[in-house]
Amino acid sequence: MYDIHHYADGKIVEGTSGRFGNIFNPSTGEVQGRVALASKAEVEGVIAVAEKAAEAWGRESVVKRARVLQNLVHILYREKDALAEALSREHGKVFSDAQGDVQRGLEVAEFAQGIPHLIKGEYSDNVSTGIDMYSMRKPLGVVAGITPFNFPAMIPLWMSTVAIACGNAFVLKPSERDPSVPMMLAACWKEAGLPDGVFNVVNGDKESVDTLCTDPRIKAVSFVGSTPIAQYVYATGTAHGKRVQAMGGAKNHMIIMPDADLDQVADALIGAAYGSAGERCMAISVAVPVGKAVADKMIEMLKPRVEALKVGHSMDPLAEMGPLVTAEHRAKVKGYIDLAEQEGSKLVVDGRSFQYNMQGFEKGFYMGGSLLDNVKPGMRSYKEEIFGPTLQVLRTESFDEAASLPTIHEYGNGTSIFTRDGDTAREYVNRVEVGMVGVNVPIPVPLAFHSFGGWKNSAFGDMNQHGMEGVRFYTKVKTVTSRWPTGIRSGAEFVIPTLN
Ligand code: NAD
């Protein structure tokens, strides 16, 4: 058993609220620790620390800030496996996948090393006679990040590396399900040479989130999580005068054209639907074959693959999929499969009753993969996000019918199309109302130097995460118009001025 507290001013700060949440090990089903849940006053204390640190950090030279990021990158590479192990112990995703979680965050730190170049302003010489005009990007001050359970390394790093490189101080409110990795990241920042108070962690729940969204000292809030909370954070934060980017849930479709390489499609679908037990906002949760022949063949190919999925504890090197994050979440996913059956879907593979019998792990939050056929657009189980190891197959007759589905759906995070035809792919890319699109790529997560963000109910606010969008989100532009009076150059005075 261990306790996780908060991190402020370069050190661990014990929680004083008297409130704690349980930290489970999803692989064993046991409570392995407790996380302190901050009170409003504790969050306000951390904001005060960050506000003080933001002043000096915002004035620090951009090259020095870049060097801290360079150090951080080296430390994160060194600590990658330790971070991944802690991550899989609290999240339940398999170790190799947890390494990927750290890697994708680390890549944003690599991007942020380039801040001297990224933050450069614009300059116009002689806009009018003797007048120059230039702009610069200034930090906002103190900014907050509120993050979900499913990427406890990547998402805090998406936000904090860019925000801090831009000269802001950062207050992270991570998910209470897996709080160890964010605290380890705090130690990495410190070792990298970041001044105390620039990176802080408050662990907590709604009380912390509400404080961060309403306190006037917080200038911007980055949120990633479920859509109802994203909407709430966006509404609350903007009503209190803050910039807010709030990423929400997803329902990602893969369109399968009759000319696609079906072996490639089946492999891609298995990884994209069941990897991380489906607990990814970019998981493919709906397969959309075009034509009956493709649909029948897909089901025939997927069924044995889903049945053969290797489910195991998070440190089992042979496991392809670990447990779900909590017993409640597993019950919710099973409830959606019950609903899908009641609504008339055909349950081709049923993962609900899967039992993992390895000694010591019998009580983990495991379930097998499920495959549902004959899904229809009107079903509630199709409209809502399930966020579990389940793939729904929605049969269509034409490209137009298939391509309209992700556009009509309320979520618009990611989608992909598998085809050999460039014209079809190009048309789909241009037509679909979704923020991130893959062509023969199942999970089109943009790299650090591009930006991440969905459309419609998958994201609220104007700017995406990381890439240049991140730099814009965490800075405000100051534009200067400058004229210098003539004088010393035309009538230079070489004698030392004296009073007379
Ligand atoms: P969540 O919405 O339950 O929690 C996210 C954060 O909000 C956590 O820090 C949590 O403490 C806080 N929170 C929870 N309830 C709150 C409340 N009532 N008031 C204020 N704050 C509250 O999400 P989760 O279960 O941790 O993560 C899974 C969800 O995140 C899924 O819907 C998934 O699609 C989404 N997600 C989206 C993206 C994206 O980029 N679009 C990425 C990852 C995850």
Image: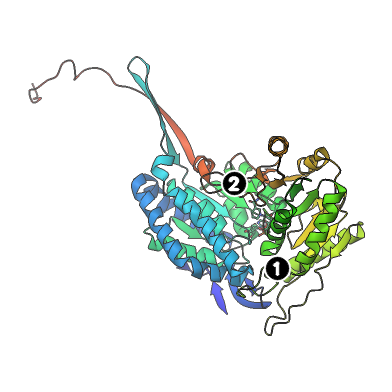
Q: Report helix, strand or loop for mark 1.
A: loop
User: For mark 2, what is the residue?
Assistant: 452
Considering depth in this image, is 386 or 359 the residue closer to the camera?
359
Left or right, 254 with reference to 128? right
| Residue 451 screen position, x and y as percent | 56, 44
Q: Residues within 10 Å of mark 1 (few under 14, many from 20)?
A: many
Does residue 258 lie above or below 338 as drawn? above
Place residue 311 in its image quadrant: bottom right
Residue drawn at point x = 34 percent, y = 50 percent: 64
| Residue 341 screen position, x and y as percent | 89, 61
Rendered-image quadrant of the C terminus: top left
Does residue 33 lie above or below 306 as drawn? below
Q: Residues within 10 Å of mark 2 (few under 14, many from 20)?
A: many
What is the C-alpha distance between the residues marked 1 and 2?
25 Å
Does the numbered disc 1 mark a residue whose Cβ is under 8 Å from ligand 1?
no
Rendered-image quadrant of the N terminus: bottom right
Query: Can you tell which mark lies on residue 324?
Result: 1
Query: Can you tell which mark lies on residue 206?
Result: none
**Which residue is the extreme one toward the bottom?**
359
Residue drawn at point x = 65 percent, y = 75 percent: 313
- Which amino acid lies under the numbered mark 1 shown in the image of this protein? Leu
Place residue 138 in its image quadrant: top left
Residue drawn at point x = 55 percent, y = 77 percent: 2
Does the numbered disc 2 mark a residue whose Cβ is under 8 Å from ligand 1?
yes
Q: Are marks 1 and 2 in contact (CB under 8 Å)?
A: no
| Residue 270 screen position, x and y as percent | 72, 60
- Which amino acid lies under the numbered mark 2 shown in the image of this protein? Phe
